[in-house]
Amino acid sequence: MHADAKSGIENVTLSYITDNGTSWINIPMNYNATTGYYEAVIPEQPIGTLVKYEITAFDHANNKSVENNSG
């Protein structure tokens, strides 16, 4: 996720669905000062479960950035 130096990151959320479901589950991501990355864990799923995810970040100026595992 990218943010400009003045705005800074406001929050980062990991959203995921399983088995092409329609209800996204949101998990707030926490900043790890040691690694410099935001982190969250998708709970363990049964073998063969298709998990789609999206990471959304907002900076203090309300700019939005989205990354996902499409494709």
Image (spheres, rainbow, N blue to C red):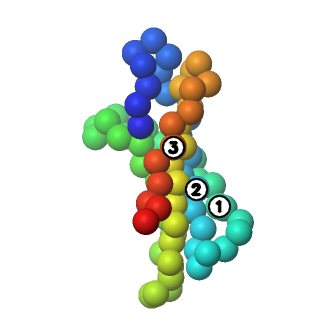
* SS for dot 2: strand
Asked if residue 43 lies left or right of residue 22, the reply is: left
Could you give the CA–CA distance between mark 2 and mark 1, rounded to whole angstroms? 5 Å
What residue is shown at x 45% (from left), y 12% (from top)?
6
* SS for dot 1: strand
Establish if 58 lies above or below 70: above
User: Looking at the picture, how far across and down is residue 60, in whole percent?
Assistant: 57, 21
What residue is shown at x 42% (from left), y 49% (from top)?
39
For badge 2, the amino acid type reads: Ser
User: Looking at the picture, how far across and down is residue 70, in whole percent?
Assistant: 47, 62
Asked if residue 39 lies left or right of residue 18, the reply is: left
Question: Residue at label 2?
Answer: 15
**Which one is closest to the eye, mark 1 or mark 3?**
3
The outermost residue toward the bottom is 47
User: Looking at the picture, how far across and down is residue 57, in whole percent?
Assistant: 53, 37
* SS for dot 3: strand
Which is more N-terminal, label 2 or label 3? 2
Establish if 42 lies above or below 48: above
Could you give the CA–CA distance between mark 1 and mark 3, rounded to whole angstroms? 16 Å
Could you give the CA–CA distance between mark 3 and mark 2, rounded to whole angstroms? 11 Å
Image marks 2 and 1: residues in contact by CB distance under 8 Å: yes
**Can residue 8 be seen here?**
yes
How many numbered tags mark residues here? 3
Question: Residue at label 3?
Answer: 66
Establish if 39 lies above or below 46: above
